[in-house]
Image (tube, helix red, strand yellow):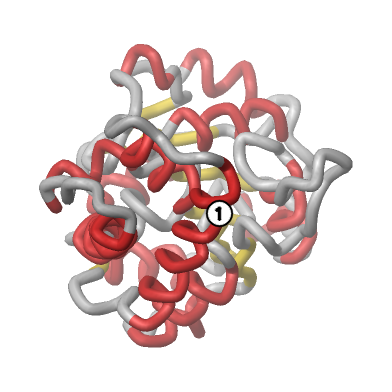
Amino acid sequence: MGWGHATNRLQFEEPSFTSARMADFPFDIVAFDLDGTLLETHRDLGTAVNHALAIAGFVAVPIDSASDLIGGGAKIMLKQAVDAQGGLPQDEFHKLYKAMLGYYGENYAVHTRPYPHAIETLDKLSARGVRLGVVTNKFEGFARGILETLGLIDRFDCVIGGDSIGKGPDGKHIAKPSPEPLLKARESCGGGRMVFIGDSSYDMRAARAANVPVVAACYGYCDKSREELGADAEIDSLGQLVDLLEQL
């Protein structure tokens, strides 16, 4: 893993507003994806998918394989599971999706837990004066609810969800891989140099479009190989992150 590519990208980053502190740490803001990056969420998501599949008479998916469906948000996750079994007309799928969201909203933190080293990594970054953010395709209310339940919400300066920015001209929520959620996170955190940590191609594409360096969380729910993700750097554990970032 080399940093040549990352160095080339970093020169285009927005100048730091806290240059004295940045002599000690190269980023003002560290933003994280949620599912598969900060939190292991596939059991609760998989249970919600299976709840919806059962309503429609489809066969349940193995819970542990639910991680293969995570990436673009709950709707895409459910659609992949439904389409694999023959699909549904749009209006029926929409009703099923709403049923899934209703169930998930009441059961989103039953099994969900932070990944190993997540808490200590957030502590280390905060101790260095870094502002922390979350950028997820999960609805903001769900993201905040999970983080509150886990006692983590107060650690973050911003939480940008898949519905935080609103809808585009196509009527769809503006979410990753659009760069807008990352740009909004940087603005909400006060500006400066930002790095994004994520595990999916949606994360990589959003970071590239926002001209933000990106680290691949290769322990997560990666929908592409390491090579295909093409991140500026990779980690196999959150415990590696701070030392990696300090090398810049």
Q: Residue at x 71, y 63 (%)?
A: 164
Residue extending furthest toward the right: 169
Q: Can the viewer see residue 9?
A: yes
Above or below, 70 against 128 in this view is: above
Tell me residue 219's x, y (percent). Answer: 22, 40
Above or below, 59 against 215 in this view is: below
Tell me residue 131's x, y (percent). Answer: 59, 66
Q: Residue at x 43, y 85 (%)?
A: 148
Which SS class for mark 1?
helix
Tell me residue 238's x, y (percent). Answer: 27, 51
Circle 1 residue: 94
Above or below, 100 against 226 in this view is: below
Q: Can the viewer see residue 40?
A: no
Left or right: 186, with 221 as reference point: right
Q: Could you say which is closer to the camera, residue 77 or residue 240?
A: 77
Q: Could you say which is closer to the camera, residue 97 or residue 197?
A: 97
Q: Residue at x 45, y 75 (%)?
A: 102
User: Residue 218 falls in which quadrant of the image?
Assistant: top left
Left or right: 218, with 92 as reference point: left
Above or below, 129 against 167 in this view is: below
Left or right: 70, with 219 as reference point: right
User: Residue 125 falls in which quadrant of the image?
Assistant: bottom left
Q: Amino acid at mark 1?
A: His
